Image (tube, grey):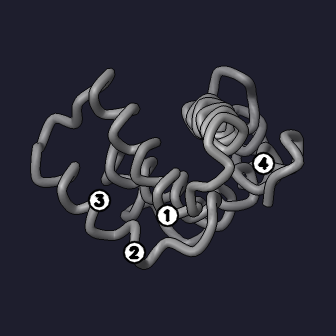
Amino acid sequence: MGLFNNIIKKLAQSSMSSIVSTTDTIAKYYLELKSSSPELSDKKIYEQIIEIRYSIRPLREGWRYESILNEIKNISNLKLLIFEILTNEAPDLLKSGNENLVMTLEIIERQLEEYGLK
């Protein structure tokens, strides 16, 4: 079982993983918005990230878009924003068990560190 978990973790950490690609995309949006509009609060930037992402790639269920916009007031950092995005785009992630949730958060954090973000 340990070998299987290690393989799954390596796949999740690969550059082809949705966790990594979503984190990279959101980190780039964040840095671009922060650079071009430094007066914006993080909450405003998070809101703009959501608007940009879902104008390009709408969610299947429209209510999820409204839900994530409403959640922004409770999101305290970029890692949680990315986790919220991932769970809205792949709701089964929340049913995948605590080990997978922790692994997802660790991968997000590691990717954010590559951009100098936490």
Q: Which residue is mark 4?
A: 112
Residue type of the residue flagged with mark 4: Leu
Residue type at tag 3? Leu
Q: Amino acid at mark 2?
A: Lys
Cβ–Cβ below 8 Å for labels 4 and 1? no
Dot 3 or dot 4, earlier in sequence: 3
Residue beneath disc 2:
73
Residue at 65% across, 67% down: 102
Mark 1 residue element:
helix
Few, some or many C-alpha atoms within 10 Å of disc 1 (few <14, some 14-19, many ≥20)?
A: some
Q: CA distance from mark 1 to mark 2?
A: 7 Å
Asked if the residue at tag 2 contacts the one at tag 1, i.e. Cβ–Cβ closer than 8 Å, the answer is yes
Q: Position of residue 55 (x, y in %)?
A: 27, 28
Q: Residue at x 79, y 60 (%)?
A: 118
Report the Cα–Cα distance between label 3 and label 1: 10 Å
Nearer to me, 70 or 102: 70
The residue mark sitting in front, 3 or 1, is: 1
Q: Pinpoint residue 110: horizontal percent, then vertical percent.
A: 83, 50
